[in-house]
Image (cartoon, rainbow, N blue to C red):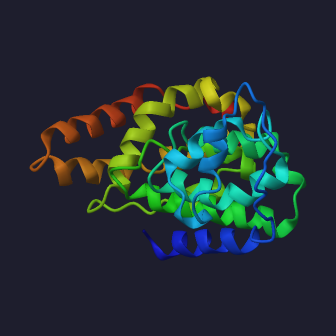
Amino acid sequence: MAPELKIAITNLYTTFAHYPFRPEIDGCPCCVSAQDQQKLSGKALNLMESEDLSHYSFKAMTTWGDVEDFKHFLPRLLELSATTGLAYGHEVVLGKLEYAKWNDWEETEKDAIRSFLLGWWTESLTNKETWGLLQIKDLYPFFGDVAPFLERWSIDFNDHSFRNLIHFILSNYHDLIEGKSHFKEFAPESINKLLSWIVAKKELLEQGFYHFEATDLEFAQKISDTLYMLDWVPWPESNQL
């Protein structure tokens, strides 16, 4: 784990430490069993595992506990999302933040969440195992801009940041141009920033093709496909700022 993400996780625990654990958290008896309740009290927060918190992450605030209970568990929920994962996926935890109206929370709490998300994003860019789990679409609602993610995307042929770039373009370019899928919620300015950033990488893609042509022909073909798509499915001039 990169130092930035470690620091951000530590900051989450510090920021939300004043929200105590309640031994008896109200829960719908149809949805929350005594065994479920026991899982929340059996370990220290930073030692809880995915199995202990996955059910809670899905039921938090809707049928189990309130916002302050959620804030107590939030540091570990986010840490697990970025490391071992949760059974219901990180989308559930991020969705719960929206449900809890996180944007109305104290500034220190919002800053801690954003710092964590940026650290997690930076970590995922070069990580073969976690790339694809976290996407710009997941993070955009917390920033309202794509610039922070693009600024952190340093490209290097020797780690997975370049492979992840190819994967991102192949998976999202058409939807970006057509404003489909999850990009429907993006502001036009953010769509344009993403497309401008992609188009500006064409020369780098060409360099990548020659770099990988001799060592990974299959991946070199994906780079070629990406270049072909950028050339023959151009970004409409009418959409450019």
Q: Would residue 137 be visible to someone looking at this image? A: no
Q: Give how far across and how far down residue 239 sits, in percent.
A: 67, 32
> Does residue 116 lie above or below 196 as drawn?
below
Query: Quick check: 21 left or right of 198?
Result: right
Query: Quick check: 137 left or right of 163?
Result: right
Residue drawn at x 68%, y 46% as measured from the top left: 140
For the residue pair 211 and 5, the one nearer the viewer reads as 5
Residue drawn at x 39%, y 29% as measured from the top left: 229
For the residue pair 239 and 41, the one nearer the viewer reads as 41
Query: Quick check: 73 left or right of 98?
Result: left
Q: Give how far across and how far down residue 7 sits, in percent.
A: 57, 76
For the residue pair 14 and 1, the one nearer the viewer reads as 14
Q: Give how far across and how far down residue 6 sits, in percent.
A: 52, 72
For the residue pair 10 and 4, the one nearer the viewer reads as 10
State how many labels appear: 0
Figure quadrant of the C terminus: top right
Q: Would residue 115 be visible to someone looking at this image? A: yes
In the current view of this chain or complex, which residue is farthest to the left? 214
Figure quadrant of the N terminus: bottom left
Q: Give how far across and how far down residue 9 sits, in percent.
A: 59, 68
Residue drawn at x 67%, y 70% as measured from the top left: 13
